[in-house]
Image (cartoon, rainbow, N blue to C red):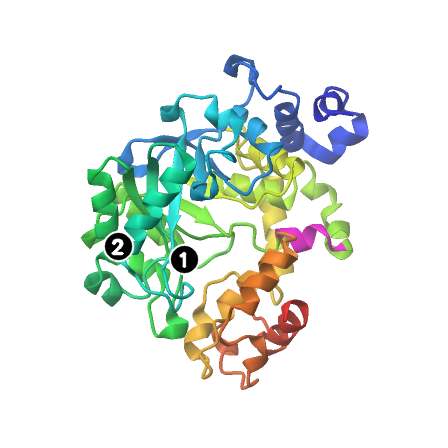
Amino acid sequence: MSDGAQNQNLSRRDMMRLGATGVAAAGIGNLPAAADEKAASDKLPKRRYGRTGLEIGWLIGASDWTKELIPRAVHAGVNYWHKAQRWTADSLPRPLKSQPRESYYLECVVDRVGGDHSHGRIDEEQHYQFVKSCLKASGVGYYDVFKFHFGYHSIEEAKQNPGMVRAFERLKKEGLVKHLAISQHHYNNIGGDMAWDILDYLAEHQPYDATQFFYTYNDRKEVGEWIDVAKKHDIATIAMKTMGGVGRAASDPKFKKLLADPKYHDTTPAAAMVKWLRSNENLTGAVIATKNFDQFRENAGAATASLAMAPHDHATLALLAGYNKGLTCLLCAECVSTCPEHLAIADIFRYERYARDYYDLDRAQKEYAALTKNGSSCAGCGDCLPACPQEIDIASKLKDVHRLLG
């Protein structure tokens, strides 16, 4: 049976399982891929992408979404596509090809060269040539956004090495890119700075129009403070790594038993998380890992403008936060500064999230294998423990992750 047929015949049991959020989202499923926009009862809200003036759908699309998912995503209002440089003229989705080029926005992610994000280098000429080669292969004409992937190691590097900005400026002058963005990580494991400190500096001194960063429920206050600072500077803010613990909780029988309590009715941890993120009016949008149509339907349904946070959503997130305590790293990287081995603890636990929350073990193992030092290098000294707001037994968890990914 097709998704459309299923959604037109929702049983009472299905409605109870989906709740208000899920039923609203299910409406997205029975829309034909090429349906007229007027037929849609719920569209993703749009927000202004900072000073660029672009109006983007709140839920960010990604080039690794399945071919079957993209038509429905386009119809639901997804118009900004993350890592679009992966698409060639042959693989560019038909739903995008069939639209005027100005009706959707493509982002080209630019990485360091000669190594990974911790050890590679910024090289103006190679970044410039990379974007030109991607444009040639894709035939899209231009990229709306040039994004520096993983970001600067430190404020000092941002001051001293303008290569990424210069590559952008050359490409912009030729009409090949329009706006400059950065996806910023923490680098205290290599003696660098925290993401929010780097972003604060960039807001005052660099021409970045948009930023992307880790953000999930119960995160460090500095992340929320950055979102407010960015709003004052008219800089766009995109949250990533948003679903902290959601995937593993959803597959845990003990958590599911707790969630069956009536006070958590009509929602799920994923839907509550989406509504919580969207409730921040200063947050432009969110990148949420989406592997299939059911996940998209849940996320898009929760993101629609008509659905506000309810008491059961707050209760569900509080339940999730309690579940995550001692178990799920929120990627704040505070522990890294105290590690005598300089292990990239937050990166290791980020790869664990790929495996346990996003169900992408292959990607997690590949990323883990590229580390210079992995979890097996932990000396078990315990110096990191006082720094962890999640009260995680980090040494024990590193061993566990090494068994999973090593």
Q: Is residue 255 above or below residue 329?
A: above
Where does residue 322 sit, x and y in percent of width and height? 62, 59
Q: Quadrant of the N terminus?
A: top right
Q: Residues within 10 Å of mark 1 (few under 14, many from 20)?
A: few
Q: Quadrant of the C terminus?
A: bottom right
Q: Residue at x 67, y 72 (%)?
A: 403
The magenta segment: 246-252
Check residue 84 in the rendering and tell me which mark sits there, or answer none: none
Labels 2 and 1: the sequence-earlier one: 2
Q: Residue at x 33, y 67 (%)?
A: 193
Q: Amino acid at mark 2?
A: Glu
Where does residue 302 sit, x and y in percent of width and height? 57, 34
Mark 2 secondary-structure assignment:
helix
Where does residue 102 sit, x and y in percent of width and height? 36, 25
Q: Residue at x 43, y 64 (%)?
A: 116
Asked if residue 251 lies in the magenta stretch, the reply is yes
Q: Residue at x 19, y 39 (%)?
A: 173
Mark 2 to mark 1: distance in Å? Answer: 38 Å
Horizontal side of 287 relative to 164 (left or right) equals right
Q: Is residue 159 above or below residue 188?
A: above
Q: Is residue 1 above or below residue 362?
A: above
Check residue 125 in the rendering and tell me which mark sits there, or answer none: 2
